[in-house]
Image (cartoon, rainbow, N blue to C red):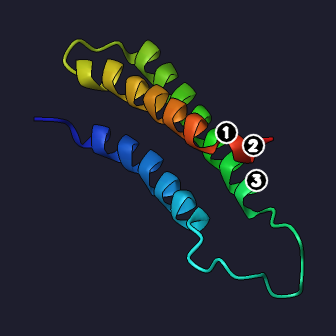
Amino acid sequence: MIKLSFWIWLAILAIPVFSLVAAQWDINNGPSIGGGGYDLGPFIYSWLLIIITFIWSLCVLGVAIVRRSRTSQLTNFGLPAIGAITFAILFLVYQNNLF
């Protein structure tokens, strides 16, 4: 059985990622109120996604290196792998918003 700490670490990543991805979903494609010709939302939200995922991955990797318990191999190797995969997917999906 997977430990509770695994699910807590995963929730710490999933909640901000899903929130920021949902904030970028543009349901209304009409012009913005106020007549502005640009929107900084995708730029800011994309950078927040990348930064949060990167910091989370570094924290999980640091904890995995420091603890190194043999009983929780999924926590030691699975969580950093999840962070790296999430970072790569988010970077590929939102790379146009970052520049």
Residue drawn at point x = 42 percent, y = 24 percent? 80
Find out whether the residues at labels 1 and 2 contact each other: C-beta distance under 8 Å: yes
Residue drawn at point x = 24 percent, y = 43 percent? 4
Q: Where is residue 59 in the image (x, y as percent from the top left)?
A: 54, 29
The amino acid type of the residue labelled 3 equals Phe
Among numbered discs 1 and 3, the one appearing first in the sequence: 3
Q: Distance between the residues labelled 1 and 3?
A: 10 Å
Q: In which quarter of the image is the C terminus?
A: top right
Q: Within 10 angstroms of label 3, few (less than 14), some, or many (20 or more) residues?
A: some
Residue carrying label 2: 98
Residue carrying label 1: 95
The one nearer the camera, 90 or 60, is 90
Q: Within 10 angstroms of label 2, few (less than 14), some, or many (20 or more) residues?
A: few
Among numbered discs 3 and 2, the one appearing first in the sequence: 3
Residue drawn at point x = 35 percent, y = 12 percent? 68
- Vertical arrangement, residue 30 with respect to residue 74, above or below: below
Q: Is mark 3 on a helix, strand or loop?
A: helix
The amino acid type of the residue labelled 1 equals Gln
Q: Distance between the residues labelled 1 and 2?
A: 5 Å
Find out whether the residues at labels 3 and 2 contact each other: C-beta distance under 8 Å: yes
The one nearer the camera, 52 or 18, is 18
Q: Within 10 angstroms of label 1, few (less than 14), some, or many (20 or more) residues?
A: some
Q: Is mark 2 on a helix, strand or loop?
A: helix
- Vertical arrangement, residue 43 with respect to residue 63, above or below: below
Q: What element carries label 1?
A: helix
The amino acid type of the residue labelled 2 equals Leu
Looking at the image, residue 41 sits to the left or right of residue 86; the answer is right
- Specify the label residue 43 is tagged with: 3
